[in-house]
Image (cartoon, coloured by chain):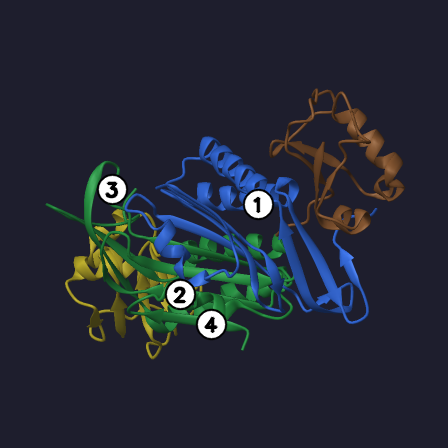
Chain colours: A brown, B yellow, C green, D blue
Amino acid sequence: MNVLFFGITKDIVGSSEINFSNELKPVNVAELKKQLIKSYPEFSKLNSLAVAVNSEYADDDLPLNGNEEIAIIPPVSGG
Amino acid sequence: MNVLFFGITKDIVGSSEINFSNELKPVNVAELKKQLIKSYPEFSKLNSLAVAVNSEYADDDLPLNGNEEIAIIPPVSGG
Amino acid sequence: MKKVIEIVDEIDTAKVYAELSDANSGGICVFVGAVREFTNNEEVVALEFETYKAMALKEMEKIADAAMQKWSLNKVVMRHAVGEKGVEEPVVIVGASSAHRDACFEACRFLIDTLKETVPIWKKEKFKNKTVWVSAHP
Amino acid sequence: MKKVIEIVDEIDTAKVYAELSDANSGGICVFVGAVREFTNNEEVVALEFETYKAMALKEMEKIADAAMQKWSLNKVVMRHAVGEKGVEEPVVIVGASSAHRDACFEACRFLIDTLKETVPIWKKEKFKNKTVWVSAHP
């Protein structure tokens, strides 16, 4: 499973893209978040943590098969 | 007494400036309006009729001595 | 210079940001009024604007000052065109800059609303077969 | 073309009126967000913006579509800059044109408010001795 990181999450993980194929096998978005927060406890201190699947905001119960484009969306601050 | 006319009032009187020294001797703004409406009955059909004295909106009870710059302000429609 | 107040023959919309920009302004809001092709389904050929210039400038100053008292603004622009204007041509531009966006949005709306109410400028709509002084009659 | 949605390196504020102008529009409202020199009394050296571009463009499209459903608009522009921006530089420009001014003012405010809430763009404030990802922490 390939995951894109932006903003502060990119700084926390130290990379803009990580392949977690050997470690993460989440069945849905909620589980992905849980696994990532376990790996990167700093994520739990953020104001919010959203996940985009195929470049759309994804609900927690959206199922994942590992072939999606996954992106971690920390609190946005455009404008 | 010199009076400036703008917009539709200029069209009604047929001039942008008229010297009424022989006809009008109003003591205040209200009387000036009354005298003008008598001369130009079309003025009474307008949405509003304001008077500016020395380029400021004037209340009806403002006294006039005849040396002011007087302007007739029909409904404004800028913008 | 915090205020730009002008009656002009032609409005240059491109320069307003340079006029409103400011190191303390995170927000700039600008409104442009332009000539529409149709009024009540009648085709407009042109609008013609005339003004009592000395008074119009004074009234615009008053509006800008009132806005600067009411909101925390860094710069204000109010500029109105006179003469004949064709479809799509700008006839008025007003804007304000401020630290945060609430103030510049509210002030910009106030500037144009109040200008339309009090500034001695008159607009004649020219249709194919007639001309009408806007708002003159009930 | 009714919508202009872009992520760019530099914002040219001068061309937005040509993009929004329309024969049926009596009103055009534009908001520009720019870099302020001070945040909470600390001097800002620059802001740096990054984005998840494919998603940001999709989200901006959704916002423009929502605005066009909610109000009667003729044209909409939403353009955000990325990269490093110094004090007074524009970072975002949004605008709308409509027959009457109510719609373009309300839509313009909606465009910037919603952009700030949902579009995946991140801003790092660079001060003399530190950098801060805006809004990241409580």
Circles 1 and 4: CB atoms closer than 8 Å: no
For label 3, the crowd category at 10 Å Cα-Cα, with few meaning under 14, some 14 to 19 and many 20 or more, is some
Residue marked by disc 1: D53
Residue marked by disc 2: C14
Mark 3 → mark 2, Cα distance in angstroms: 26 Å
Q: Is residue C107 above or below residue C138?
A: below
| Residues marked 3 and 1, same chain | no
Circle nearer the viewer, 3 or 2: 2
- Quadrant in which the N terminus of chain A is drawn: top right
Residue D45's spot in the image, x, y percent? 70, 70
Q: Does the rendering let one see residue B60?
A: no
Which residue is at the front of the view, D3 or D20? D3
Circle nearer the viewer, 3 or 1: 1
For label 2, the crowd category at 10 Å Cα-Cα, with few meaning under 14, some 14 to 19 and many 20 or more, is some
Q: Dot 3 lies on which element?
A: strand
**Could you tell which of marks 4 and 2 lies nearer the N-terminus?**
4
- State which chain disc 3 sits on: C
